[in-house]
Amino acid sequence: MSKSVLIVGAGGVGSVVAHKCAMVPEVFGKIHLASRTVSKCEEIAKSVLERTGVTITTSALDADVVANTVALLKELKPDLLLNVALPYQDLVLMDACLECGVDYLDTANYEPKDEAKFEYHWQWAYQERFEQAGLTALLGSGFDPGVTNVFTAWMLKHHFDEITEIDIVDVNGGDHGQHFATNFNPEINIREVTAPCRHWEDGAFQETPPLSHKLSFDCPEEVGTYNIYQMYHEEMESLVKHIPTIKRARFWMSFGDAYLKHLEVLQNVGMTGIEPIEYNGQEIIPLQFLKAVLPDPGDLGQTTQGRTCIGVIAKGIKDGKEKRVYTYNICNHEECFEEVGSQAVSYTTGVPAMIGAKMMLEGKWDGNGVWNMEQFDPDPFMEELNAHGLPWKVVELDVEQYNQFS
């Protein structure tokens, strides 16, 4: 029952997706990789062939233009478009899929180029069009969003009658040896970190200044203790919509002191701006220039050591009693590089993208319209995480003693 997929995007995540799809040939019979820079696609294809013996095809694609993707879709006739390009391109690629009758998957929600604001409402507005076309669009099939949504749905199914609070905690305990670098696309990463923080409480999103709330978090399995900062992340928006018993939802991410100091300086001198400025007779966007001079996240795998620890701490009610459950994954940077040539941040996003695609192509997750991860049965996805390199653990925390997020 092997199918055909078009992967759009040849960064660190795109590389992981291509490698992991090639490792499941019984599902992904034909793999095509496209990006604006075809040489990156060719490098990934060479690595895939060397590591797996599978040949994938490649082409250049400017995914900012609907007609370009439409032409490629009509040529390839894939069963699924797997979007791991920039969030700016989500709507363009969804339009192309609608025109060509192709199912769609991405790992991050749409964000307009001229505004550092990422929300689902732009993509949720496609619900009726995908439904009427008889097509499926799966949104946010990365780790966070993605696996964190599935963790929450799985805990609700197996550990709670209702969930009232969630704290999503993303810790990267890795060291890449650079003075300053981002773990994924610098432009998207810096826009996320510098945006105002929002969390869900009292029936609405509450806004606070960026990085204004900090905690010290003890990771399990001796990963270490890290400073984590509250920030906005899109999975909260879909989780509180689809699990309306959630009264409070927060997202936390770890940042080192050196990263924050560099970021502060870059902000102060205007290098994180997204408004065009004139330089030598042409317009440039400071953040895009900064991205060009920073290390490519796809190249960090060679030097990165340590582990990531990402999970969800949920609080709720079971059989009339309050309980708290923590479901998490720990991923080793060096093991990821050995397997697919990428660091763990790309790996933890790319593997769930492949699994989400597998769920769709096998018909385990199916339905006309636009869907978020928590809307489907979490059990088969959780099984696939264990099978494809992201094993998870679940522990029940003592409600009386565990007050870290109270």
Image: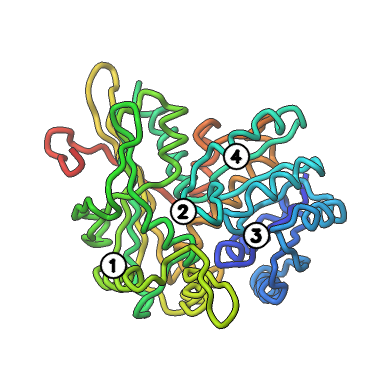
In-image side of 162 versus 18 (left or right): left
Q: Which residue is mark 3?
A: 23
Check disc 2: other Cα within 10 Å, few if <14, some if 14-19, many if 20+. Answer: some
Q: Badge 3 local density, few (<14 within 10 Å), some, or many (20+)? A: some
The secondary element bearing badge 4 is classed as helix
- The residues bearing labels 3 and 2 have C-alpha atoms spaced at a distance of 36 Å
Density class for disc 4 (Cα within 10 Å; few <14, some 14-19, many ≥20) is some
Mark 1 to mark 2: distance in Å?
19 Å
CA separation, marks 2 and 4?
A: 16 Å
Q: Which residue is mark 4?
A: 123
Measured as percent of width and height from the top left, residue 101 is found at 80, 40
Kindly indicate the quadrant of the structure image that contains residue 307.
bottom left
Q: Could you tell whether 242 is left or right of 229 in the image?
A: right
Q: Which numbered disc, 3 or 1, marks the residue that appears first in the sequence?
A: 3
Amino acid of disc 4: Gln
Question: Is residue 337 visible to us here?
Answer: no
Side (left or right) of 181 relative to 32: left
Answer yes or no: do the residues labelled 1 and 4 have beta carbons within 8 Å? no
Residue to which mark 2 is pinned: 116
Upstream in sequence: badge 2 or badge 4: 2
Task: Give the mark nearer the N terminus: 3 vs 2.
Answer: 3
Q: Nearer the viewer, mark 3 or mark 1?
A: 1
Judged from the image, the secondary structure of the residue bearing numbered disc 1 is helix
